Image: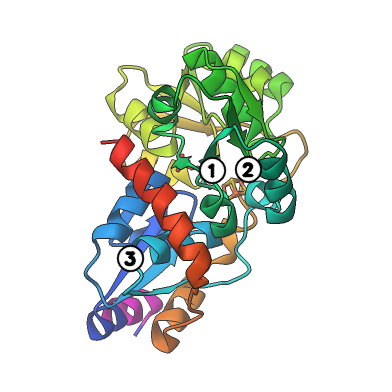
């Protein structure tokens, strides 16, 4: 029996579901029951009736699934699958900011720990961020954490002045504007599409900016046939499957490296998925006090983004 068959058998035996982010290895995407962006995955986790949820993504996502559906067992194939953006916002420093600025309304991007979510008024993802910022009380200053690139972009889009936490994603800050411009001269009809976690100079060049799901939708629906894609390269797998015949070029990083692959997301492998299903671990646990606060801000996001 190969790994794919083994995983299918284990899923049935354990009444398990695999939820996967677009940045996962293509093999993992192919065994997943549901693939989505952060918002779609949070919704899928909330409504899941499976006994076991295997989250093929990173730690903050699996933690979010546990918070939204605490009666389910949630497992992550590799517990070391963290996130540089989440790490750029340590809870002690965040608590100090909140204490010094009690008047601020806090909007946190979902790429943060449960402790940060518990200290936030509402959570957002890249697909609902405009809606969430527009709904924030007009009479209060806003702190947007932790992604400064997404924060600056949404501030420009909504006209809301915000204090930005100075965090960023190591993958989305890797793209080279110079190499992208060179690529565009070789492919003059290609559209540059980018995730809003990218730096300002990349976003300024982009023809379309959106969350992973929106980038995918854009490629499927567009009448154009060539795209330079500035986000983690895992998304190209679904783009190639759902929009066959379209030419997809991964935006080049500054260095000669595979830096447009998230080193955290890619810690999960097909072998680890099979092992996690077999052993029902490693399991995600969230402390009770943090769970309550984080649930409130996550549920408010889901209410505000319908
Ligand atoms: P979305 O899939 O919500 O666009 O998020 C991208 C991301 O960086 C996840 O880590
Ligand atoms: Fe975090 Fe960036 Fe990896 Fe997403 S791509 S999980 S934001 S490090």
> x, y (%) of residue 117?
52, 51
> x, y (%) of residue 301?
38, 42
Work out whether mark 2 precedes mark 3 in sequence or the reverse, and give the earlier one.
3
Tell which of 251 and 198 is nearer to you. 198
Name the residue carrying label 3: 69
Main secondary structure found in the magenta portion: helix
- Tell me how many marks there are: 3
Front tag of 3 and 1: 3
For the residue with label 2, is its CB less than 8 Å from the closest atom of ligand 2?
Answer: no
Q: Residues within 10 Å of mark 2 (few under 14, many from 20)?
A: many
Name the residue carrying label 2: 260
Name the residue carrying label 1: 233
> x, y (%) of residue 14?
28, 84
> x, y (%) of residue 291?
46, 64
Gap in angstroms between the C-alphas marked 3 and 1 = 30 Å
For the residue with label 3, is its CB less than 8 Å from the closest atom of ligand 1?
Answer: no
| Quadrant hosting residue 279 | bottom left
Q: Indicate which disc residue 98 carries.
A: none
Looking at the rendering, the stretch of residues picked out in magenta corresponds to: 2-9
Gap in angstroms between the C-alphas marked 1 and 2 = 6 Å
Taking the magenta stretch, the answer to whether it contains residue 5 is: yes
Secondary structure under badge 1? loop
Work out whether mark 3 precedes mark 1 in sequence or the reverse, and give the earlier one.
3
Front tag of 2 and 3: 3
Residue at (34% x, 77% y) in the render? 7
Q: In this view, does 270 lie above or below 118?
A: below
Q: Do the residues under discs 1 and 2 have CB atoms within 8 angstroms?
A: yes
Name the side, left or right, on which 139 lies relative to 149.
left
Residue at (66% x, 16% y) in the render? 181
Gap in angstroms between the C-alphas marked 2 and 3 = 32 Å
Secondary structure under badge 3? loop
Q: In which quarter of the image is the N terminus?
A: bottom left
């Amino acid at each position: 029996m190969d790994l794919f068959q083994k995983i299918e058998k284990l899923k049935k035996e354990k009444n398990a579901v695999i939820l996967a982010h677009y940045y996962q290895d293509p093999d993992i995407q192919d065994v997943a029951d549901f693939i989505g962006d952060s918002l779609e995955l949070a919704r899928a986790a909330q409504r899941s009736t499976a006994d076991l949820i295997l989250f093929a993504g990173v730690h903050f996502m699996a933690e979010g699934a546990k918070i939204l559906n605490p009666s389910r067992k949630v497992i992550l194939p590799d517990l070391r699958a963290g996130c540089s953006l989440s790490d750029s916002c340590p809870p002690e420093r965040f608590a100090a900011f909140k204490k010094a600025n009690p008047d601020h309304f806090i909007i946190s991007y979902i790429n943060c720990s449960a402790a940060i979510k518990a200290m936030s008024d509402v959570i957002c993802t890249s697909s609902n961020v405009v809606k969430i910022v527009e709904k924030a009380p007009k009479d209060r200053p806003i702190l947007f954490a932790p992604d400064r690139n997404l924060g600056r972009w949404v501030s420009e889009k909504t006209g809301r002045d915000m204090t930005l936490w100075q965090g960023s994603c190591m993958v989305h800050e890797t793209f080279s504007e110079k190499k992208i411009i060179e690529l565009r001269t070789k492919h003059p009809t290609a559209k540059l599409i980018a995730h809003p976690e990218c730096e300002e100079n990349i976003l300024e060049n982009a023809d379309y900016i959106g969350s992973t799901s929106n980038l995918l939708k854009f490629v499927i629906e567009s009448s154009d046939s060539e795209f330079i894609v500035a986000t983690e390269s895992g998304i190209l797998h679904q783009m190639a499957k759902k929009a066959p015949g379209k030419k997809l070029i991964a935006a080049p990083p500054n260095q000669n490296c595979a830096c447009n692959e998230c080193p955290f997301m890619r810690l999960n492998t097909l072998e680890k998925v099979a092992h996690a299903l077999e052993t029902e671990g490693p399991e995600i646990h969230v402390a009770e006090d943090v769970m309550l606060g984080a649930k409130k801000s996550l549920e408010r996001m889901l209410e505000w983004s319908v």
